[in-house]
């Protein structure tokens, strides 16, 4: 099937078709899956249910005590990443989108501007959009590894800029903050009176030592994460926002978060009470996750070494990978054609990459599914699907 550019192909076409194929069971090799549980990386149902039930029964009727324990557990988690967090600066919300939204609402006033990375997946979905806050892009660059474009960040700062958002790691490039980049951002935000907001849901996937924004010393920093990434439990609805930085800068944001978090649906009492135990038992899940990511990343790299028709562009963390293909290949048309063959990969255009020459794949699928999907992608790119 031809993958030439046609006026009828768009990212919306791909997204709608992908959902149709998933619903009908026609997908054989889904390389767009983002839920670890669907890829064999979830917790055993009986273990999870027993843990939630046991924790709820042990402190039933004591929500304030459960809240403090959960806050202390998050502070302990961040201590493992070299950050000192005051427990009363941790707030819980039921979804990743809600955490991102209230983090920005706590920092910004109407008409303020927030700098966000590009290429990257949209920071806020349409339902969580903040019409009063303008999002302005700064660049990520690839020089063998995705990283911050420092000159682009400096150029992007304007008179209404109030925050710089980083994905740590960023989706889908996997760009991670190194210690030198964190120091740069800490100084830059401190100098301009900006907040540093880190979406750090998959911080634990870093290949090397990772630097959380919660380690910032000069500026107000807001760490966003939760059970979705740290424990692979997106359906539990246990996400958090934590405020770091000097007391003089953090007070207003903490106060606003207290009000904003009270205005969204709370996380369930059972999840709140089980959260310390869930965090304490995260390592078996994370070990399996990192092994899966490494295995699938190696499969892509091996294909590159044998001159498969793609180049792996990766940044050091996260659960996605960018594949650079022919610069004349329309990615949406290609992905639609692959869907007809039962293979799902994302066109890079959905994640801020150019509309030609880039694909995005999830590194979560089971290795046999991942390898089979790559083989069919390779065959299609070589012209014999």
Image (cartoon, helix red, strand yellow):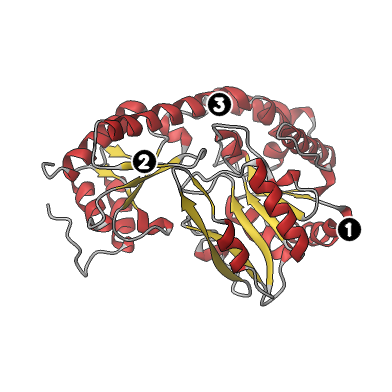
Element type where label 1 sits in the image: helix
Asked if residue 138 shows in the view, the reply is: yes
Image check: 135 left or right of 62? left
Relative to residue 206, is residue 252 depicted above or below? below
The image shows residue 285 at horizontal and vertical percentages of 55, 26
Residue 248 marker = 1
Q: Residue at x 72, y 59 (%)?
A: 189
Q: Which of the two labelled residues, at mark 3 and mark 2, occupies the earlier sequence position?
A: 3
Element type where label 3 sits in the image: helix
Asked if residue 239 shows in the view, the reply is: no
Residue 285 marker = 3
Neighbour tally class for label 3: few under 14, some 14-19, many 20 plus, Cα within 10 Å? some
Q: Which of the two labelled residues, at mark 3 and mark 1, occupies the earlier sequence position?
A: 1
Query: Decide: marks 3, 1 in contact (CB < 8 A)?
Result: no
Q: Quadrant of residue 265?
A: bottom right
Q: Tell me the CA gap for discs 3 and 2.
A: 26 Å
Query: Decide: marks 1, 2 in contact (CB < 8 A)?
Result: no
């Amino acid at each position: 099937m031809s993958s030439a550019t046609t006026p009828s192909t768009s990212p919306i076409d791909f997204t709608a078709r992908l959902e149709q194929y998933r619903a009908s069971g026609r997908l054989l090799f889904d390389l767009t899956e983002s839920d670890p549980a669907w890829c064999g990386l979830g917790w055993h149902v009986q273990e999870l249910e027993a843990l939630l039930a046991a924790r709820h029964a042990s402190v039933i009727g004591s929500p304030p005590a459960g809240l403090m324990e959960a806050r202390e557990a998050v502070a302990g988690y961040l201590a493992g990443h070299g950050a000192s967090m005051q427990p009363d600066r941790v707030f819980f919300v039921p979804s990743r989108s809600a955490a991102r939204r209230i983090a920005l609402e706590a920092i910004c006033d109407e008409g303020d501007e927030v700098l966000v990375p590009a290429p990257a997946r949209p920071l806020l979905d349409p339902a969580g959009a903040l019409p009063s806050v303008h999002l302005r892009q700064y660049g990520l660059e690839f020089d063998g590894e995705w990283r911050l474009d420092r000159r682009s960040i400096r150029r992007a700062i304007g008179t209404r800029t109030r925050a710089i958002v980083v994905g740590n790691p960023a989706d889908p490039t996997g760009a991670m903050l190194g210690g030198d980049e964190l120091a740069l951002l800490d100084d830059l935000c401190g100098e301009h009176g900006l907040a540093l907001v880190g979406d750090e849901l998959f911080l634990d996937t870093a290949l090397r030592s990772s630097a959380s924004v919660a380690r910032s010393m000069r500026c107000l920093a807001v760490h966003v994460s939760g059970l979705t990434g740290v424990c692979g439990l997106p359906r539990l609805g246990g996400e958090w926002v934590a405020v770091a930085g000097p007391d003089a800068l953090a007070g207003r944001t903490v106060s606003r978060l207290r009000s904003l978090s009270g205005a969204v649906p709370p996380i369930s009492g059972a999840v709140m009470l089980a959260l310390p135990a869930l965090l304490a038992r995260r390592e078996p899940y994370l070990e399996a996750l990192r092994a899966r990511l490494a295995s699938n990343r190696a499969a892509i790299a091996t294909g590159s070494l044998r001159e498969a028709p793609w180049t792996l562009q990766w940044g050091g963390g996260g659960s996605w990978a960018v594949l650079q293909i022919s610069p004349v290949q329309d990615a949406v048309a290609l992905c639609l054609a692959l869907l007809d063959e039962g293979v799902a990969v994302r066109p890079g255009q959905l994640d801020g990459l150019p509309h030609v020459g880039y694909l995005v794949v999830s590194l979560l699928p089971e290795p046999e599914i991942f390898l089979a999907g790559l083989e069919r992608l390779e065959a299609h790119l070589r012209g014999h699907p």
